[in-house]
Amino acid sequence: MRIGELAETVGVTTRTVRHYHHLGLLPEPERRSNGYRDYGLRHAVVLARIRRLTELGLGLTEVRDVLADDAGRDLVEVLTELDEDLARQESAIRERRARLRTLLDSGELPAEGPVSPELTAVFSELTHTSTLPADSPMATKDREMLALLDTVATPAERSRIMELVGSAVATPDAVARAHEAYALLDALADTEHPVDPADPRVDEAARALAACVPATVLPEGSPVDQDSGFLRAFYADFAPAQAEAIRRMLRLVTRERT
């Protein structure tokens, strides 16, 4: 058989046959006097087996192990590993679909989405109760930060964050304090008339923000590294007066609880 006839018989392309030759999976036949390869039935048998193995999901390295006489790995061993790997993939896919279903069933997705189902539920609750002012740039930044923490947190940390957010707006008084803090911080971001970080309003905003922070956010003995790379990037995302208010808030909170 010519290479095209072999490929057509087995149901692959001539390029695939040549690739298998290059990898050493399929022995090359001797050439006729006219220079053409002359494939026999044995080549078709081996090529068909390669096709079956790859269709099961084996990589070409694993196929080589199965075909090699001295590989020390029989077909049962390779297929068992493949089955275990597929089971892991299947479990991961089921988990991802369950998360997607939860997000889709939750109704309107948050602008910061996709986020975890837990944070989606929190955002939905905050929106429906009008806890966070929709037109507040600071509230928007808060949601973005929650989405960031939601992404990098472990499941245990995520659960704690959700509890803290809930406790921060659990009562009408807490909601009122949050609105006051957002308004004060938004006022510090006046682009037409930049606020000096020494302005008295900065200290007022810091105290209002500190009043919103649950005691469990920074337990006793939990210092804050103000020079960490994360906090430097965090502060840089705010107007100078806003960043100073947040710095002072952290000092207030840690001073009171250490």
Image: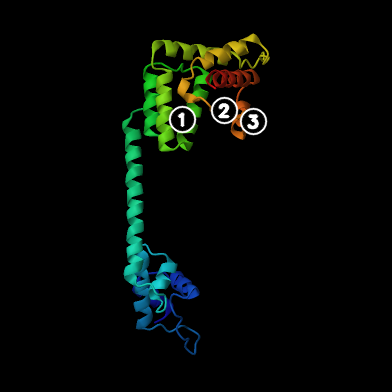
**Would you say 107 lies left or right of 258 here?**
left
Q: Residue at x 59, y 33 (%)?
A: 230
**Would you say 70 lies left or right of 222 here?**
left
74 and 215: which one is in front?
215
Number of marks: 3
- Judged by depth in the image, the label closer to the viewer, 1 or 2, is 2
Q: Determine which residue is flagged by label 3.
A: 227
Q: Residue at x 42, y 80 (%)?
A: 2
Q: CA distance from mark 1 to mark 3?
A: 28 Å
Residue 106 seen from this side: yes
Query: Which element carries disc 1, helix, strand or loop?
Result: loop
Q: Determine which residue is flagged by label 2.
A: 223
41 and 52: which one is in front?
52
- Judged by depth in the image, the label closer to the viewer, 1 or 3, is 3
Q: Determine which residue is flagged by label 1.
A: 112
Q: CA distance from mark 1 to mark 2?
A: 30 Å
Q: How is the image coloured?
A: rainbow
Three-letter amino acid code at disc 3?
Asp
Label 1, residues with CA under 10 Å away: few <14, some 14-19, many ≥20: some
Q: Position of residue 119 (x, y in %)?
A: 40, 29
- Judged by depth in the image, the label closer to the viewer, 3 or 2, is 2
* Res. 173 image quadrant: top left
* Res. 126 image quadrant: top left
Three-letter amino acid code at disc 2?
Pro
* Res. 254 image quadrant: top right
In the picture, the quarter occupied by the C terminus is top right
In the picture, the quarter occupied by the N terminus is bottom left
Residue 182 seen from this side: no
Q: Are marks 1 and 2 in contact (CB under 8 Å)?
A: no
Q: Are marks 3 and 2 in contact (CB under 8 Å)?
A: no
Q: Position of residue 236 (x, y in %)?
A: 63, 27
